[in-house]
Each structure stands twice: as structure tokens, then as C-alpha cells.
Image (cartoon, rainbow, N blue to C red):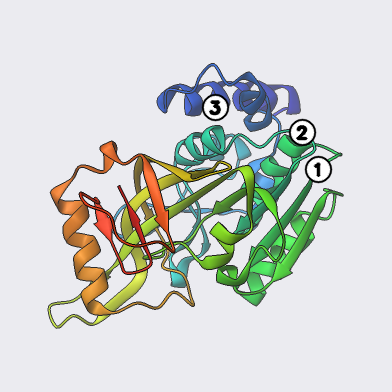
Amino acid sequence: MEETDLAVCRQAYAAQMLAKMGVADDERLRQIFATVPREDFLDPPPWRMANGIGYQDMPSTDPVILYQDVLIALQEERQVNNGSPSLHALGLHWLAPQPGETACHIGAGGGYYTAMLSHLVGSGGHVTAIEYDRELAARASANLAPYGNVELVCGNGLEWPKSSADAIYVNFATHRPADPWIGNLSVGGRLIFPLSAPSRDGNDNLRPRSARGGFFLIRRTATEYSARYLSPTVFVWGHAASGTIETYKALESTFRHGGMEKVTRLRWKMPKQEDEWYSEVDWGLL
């Protein structure tokens, strides 16, 4: 396809992804979805698309095929994908990184959504991207080389950020927020992470390749942490995330009973309160 035609396709894709999630009025994000080339963050074709039960070859090697709401394999054997553009449109809209801010992308994958964060914070801002898998981190580092405000780190995302951040965007599943995500969130800062329980077999053995749960938005004010449920999610389970079967069952049961839409606050390192939607000893959502 001619580059001008591909640009038109990207514009349509951007409008569709934002409209699908009810954030069509976010013009700055729409422009970024229309600008960042998805193909630059994938292996060469043929591309492999998740189809719900596995993967299949995409029916074309023309980049235009990439501009739809599909998951495309980064590491098929681990079920690691370049994730749903519409879900990330929703996440990035609510994360709302601003020019000049410091952002941390935890679980960067191939770097596609890191590149969007780079544009959102602009040349005066900075993005630290964390990827645990060495092979993926090397690929992301190469893909993001043109983005001068991005630093790529191969490391454990549960240990980052190391200093204050305005926007923290987590793209792997875990049963609780990590201490640095909350402790290093600046006043006025926003965190989005997938709170999830890993899948298990009938004997309670973990099947950690994917976990179902929901995107939660945490905002820090001078006195508290507000919280908001955004959307259901399915993400790869975090490498270093470790809870107990009892914790996973409790969280799974809480999601099954619903009510997450009513969550408004995060309790952190304080005593439990009445009527919490989900509770652990040192944190909860209410």
C-alpha cells in the first residue's frame, strides 16, 4: 500500500479505537494512534493473530491489516502479544500523561504503547520502560531507539519505578499493586494496573500464562488515593507476581460477585475499613 493510503488507514483506525471505548473526544490521543506505526514494533510478516483458541496467520503481509482491534503475537509460545489497541486507547486516555511529565511503562513488550507514551509526555518528559524478558527487552530497545525521551530497562516491574513518577502504566496481571507503584506515585499522579487472579486447573495448579481481572485507575491526592474500575482485562501473569491460592480464590470470587463499578478509593497500609469491595491486611478497595 502507498504510504499516503496507509496514513489514511491509520487515521480511520485511530478514530475507531477511541470511539469503541467512548473516548473519541481525546484528540491528542487520536493523533498519536494515527501516527505511531504498529508494524515498527512487530516481527516481519507473516504476522500471527490471536483468535481466541490459538493463533493463525494474518491473511495479508500488507501493514494495513494491522490497523484493527486484534492481538498480534510477540512471543506466541508464551502467549505474549501486542495487545488490544482499543483497551490501550482506554487505558492511555485515563492515564492522561501530560507534556513534561515522568511516566513509567511496566511490561513494555515490543514498545508500541511505550512509543505512544513517549509522544504524550513530549520532548520535555521522560518514559522509563521496564520489560522482564531479555529477548523482548532487546527488541523493544531497538524499536524505541528513535525515541530520545525513552529509557529501556530489563528488570522486574514489581520493583519499579525507583523514584517519583506522574504516570505509571502496568501491562501485566498481578493480584495486588506493588509497593513502588503506590509509594513512588507523585501527588496528582495516576496509576493504571490490571488487578487479576491467575487461571488454575481443577487441582488448583496455576496456569499463569493469562489472568482475568480488571483495569483499575488509582489517583494520588495530598491526603488519599482515589480508585476507579475501567474495564475487564486479560493479561499475561507477571513473572514475579506471587500470592497464595487463598488470595487468588478470594479475588476471583470478589470479581465474580461484581460491584467493582462502585469502587472509589484505595486503602493503603492502613487498618481495614467497613464495606470494602476487596480486602487484604495491608490494602483494600472500597
Q: Reply above or below: 222 against 145.
A: above
Q: Residue at x 41, y 65 (%)?
A: 174
Q: Quadrant of residue 129?
A: bottom right
The answer to whether 164 appears left or right of 216 in the picture is right
* Residue 134 x/y as whole percent: 66, 76
- The answer to whether residue 136 is seen in the rendering is yes
State which quarter of the image contains the N terminus.
Answer: top right
Q: Which callout, 3 or 2, points at the residue further toward the start of the chain?
A: 3
Q: Residue at x 73, y 57 (%)?
A: 128
Q: Is the residue under label 1 in contact with that under label 3 (CB below 8 Å)?
A: no
User: Could you tell me how far apart the alpha carbons at marks 3 and 1 are, in whole angstroms?
Assistant: 26 Å
- Disc 3, SS: helix
Quarter of the image where one finds residue 35: top right
Q: Which mark is residue 125?
A: 1
Image location of residue 103, percent across then percent down: 69, 49
Determine the residue positioned at 60% across, 51% down. Answer: 168
Which callout, 3 or 2, points to the residue nearer the camera? 2
Label count reads 3
Residue 161: where, in percent of width, then height? 66, 62
Amino acid at pointer 2: Pro
Nearest to the eye among marks 3 and 1: give it. Answer: 1
Marks 2 and 1 in Cβ contact (< 8 Å): yes
Label 2 belongs to which residue? Answer: 99
Q: Callout 3, which amino acid?
A: Tyr
Q: Which residue is mark 3?
A: 13
User: Looking at numbered disc 1 in the image, what kind of residue is underneath it?
Assistant: Gly
Q: Earlier in the sequence, mark 3 or mark 1?
A: 3
Give the SS element for disc 2: loop
Q: Secondary structure at mark 1?
A: loop
